[in-house]
Amino acid sequence: MRQRVFDYIAKHPEGVTRPQVLTHVYADDPNGGPNNENVVSVHVRNINKRLQGMRIKAAGGPGSTYKLVKL
């Protein structure tokens, strides 16, 4: 799932919201995916621990977008 989250965010330099990430990443899940949108934040935190020279950053408050940025 982490790879799918990273790939989706990387393909959208304009930024994507948590609901957009969930809809894409869990599109094949027969149960519709997790009930809590915070799972995206957990994936992003774990992805960022492994990235070198770039980060996924959240811009804004509620309804914020995730973007992949170079450091």
Image (cartoon, rainbow, N blue to C red):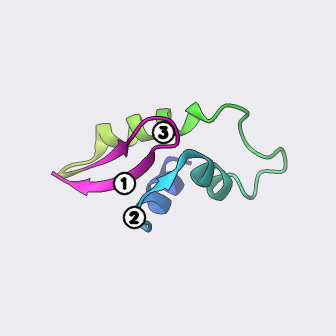
Q: Nearer the viewer, residue 1 or 17?
A: 17
Numbered-mark total:
3
C-beta proximity under 8 Å, tags 3 and 1: no
Taking the magenta stretch, the answer to whether it contains residue 65 is yes
Find numbered disc 3 in the image and state the secondary structure of the residue it sits on.
helix
Magenta span of residues: 55-71
Residue for point 53% across, 40% down: 40
Residue position marked by numbered label 1 in the rendering: 67
Residue position marked by numbered label 2 in the rendering: 14
How much space separates mark 1 and mark 2, taking CA atoms? 7 Å
Q: Which amino acid does label 1 sit on?
A: Lys
The x and y percentages for residue 50 are 30, 42
Q: What residue type is labelled 2?
A: Glu
Residue for point 36% across, 44% down: 59
- N-terminal label among 1 and 2: 2
Q: Residue 44's image quarter?
A: top left
The x and y percentages for residue 68 are 33, 55
